[in-house]
């Protein structure tokens, strides 16, 4: 019993170390800010401050530092280890589980989800969380998830995720998700490519990937892409993932809570 307890503590400590790195508390987090400036022009929807672990994911979130009525847009990681983008006080939150080697996920991301991010997440009307699953096509699937996570160490998770989907569909995953191709992606994003390459090669985030898989299992997710929705303090529920449905849900939630919950640009 004591040995099991010590093993559990060891795993918890490893996971805490992972979260600290991804939340921007590593010593190299400041150096990522320079390259972040150049990425803003290419990825404007992701050009928001880092909040590290977002402690409050409900309507009661502190909005200090924003003009009255303006959304408090941030990106970071939730207390559950899921990547987050948007206003934590948004009246509705969406959670997407995807796989980089899933062709449906790639098409969904590029055609529907990026449009929804531009129209509703960037406006503060909805917030988005992401969990990445790795089912098939090894080692390419694991490589891609690690590439996004390792880029997250340098403040570029969302940008790397975007490039992985775009290049994976354009070049094929067996070409786009090799160590050399990932290193090139990191270089193109203005990151330290050697640091990303070492991180991917080490398989540094296997424990966090296991946590994504367990979260998906707990929520009844068995296929990708799957989208879930949560209003206020309620629980997650699966929803139809197409843009029109997500937009309608966001509009309805915004209308129900009033303009203070987000901008009214749509």
Image (cartoon, rainbow, N blue to C red):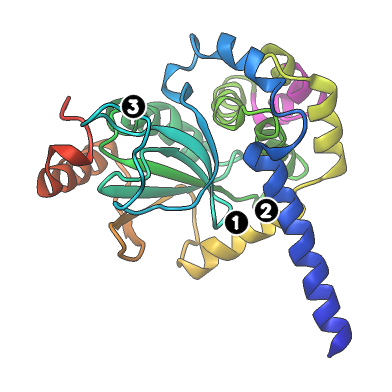
Which residues are the magenta region? 172-184
Mark 3 lies on residue: 115
At horizontal 34% and vertical 28% (from top left) the residue drawn is: 122
Whether tag 2 and tag 1 are in contact, CB under 8 A, the answer is yes
Per the image, label 1 sits on a secondary structure element best described as helix
Per the image, label 3 sits on a secondary structure element best described as helix
- Across and down, in percent, residue 144 comes to 68, 36
Front in this rendered view, residue 30 or 8: 30
Mark 2 or mark 3: whose residue is earlier in sequence: 3
Location of residue 176 by image quarter? top right
Q: CA distance from mark 3 to mark 1?
A: 25 Å
Task: State which quarter of the image contains the C terminus.
Answer: top left
Q: Which mark is residue 212?
A: 1
Q: Residue furthest front?
A: 64
- Across and down, in percent, residue 135 comes to 64, 52
Disc 2 crowd rating (10 Å Cα; few below 14, some 14-19, many 20+) is many
């Amino acid at each position: 019993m004591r040995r099991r307890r010590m093993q559990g503590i060891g795993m918890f400590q490893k996971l805490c170390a992972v979260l600290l790195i991804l939340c921007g508390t590593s010593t190299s987090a400041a150096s990522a800010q320079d390259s972040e400036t150049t990425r803003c022009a290419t990825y404007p929807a992701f050009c928001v401050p880092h909040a590290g672990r977002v402690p409050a994911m409900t309507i009661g979130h502190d909005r200090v530092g924003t003009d009255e009525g303006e959304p408090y847009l941030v990106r970071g990681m939730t207390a559950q280890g899921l990547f987050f983008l948007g206003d934590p006080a948004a009246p509705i939150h969406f959670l997407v589980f995807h796989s980089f080697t899933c062709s449906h996920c790639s098409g969904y991301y590029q055609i529907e989800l990026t449009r929804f991010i531009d129209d509703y997440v960037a406006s503060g009307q909805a917030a988005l969380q992401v969990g990445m699953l790795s089912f098939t096509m090894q080692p390419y699937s694991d490589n891609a998830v690690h590439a996004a996570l390792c880029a997250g160490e340098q403040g570029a998770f969302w940008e790397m995720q975007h490039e992985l989907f775009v290049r994976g569909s354009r070049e094929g995953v067996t070409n786009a998700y090799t160590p050399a191709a990932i290193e090139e992606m990191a270089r193109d994003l203005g990151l330290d490519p050697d640091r990303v390459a070492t991180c991917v090669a080490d398989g540094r985030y296997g424990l966090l990937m296991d946590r994504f898989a367990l979260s998906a299992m707990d929520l009844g997710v068995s296929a990708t892409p799957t989208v879930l929705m949560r209003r206020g303090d309620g629980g997650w529920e699966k929803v139809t993932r197409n843009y029109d449905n997500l937009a309608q849900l966001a509009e309805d939630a915004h209308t129900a809570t009033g303009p203070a919950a987000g901008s009214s640009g749509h």
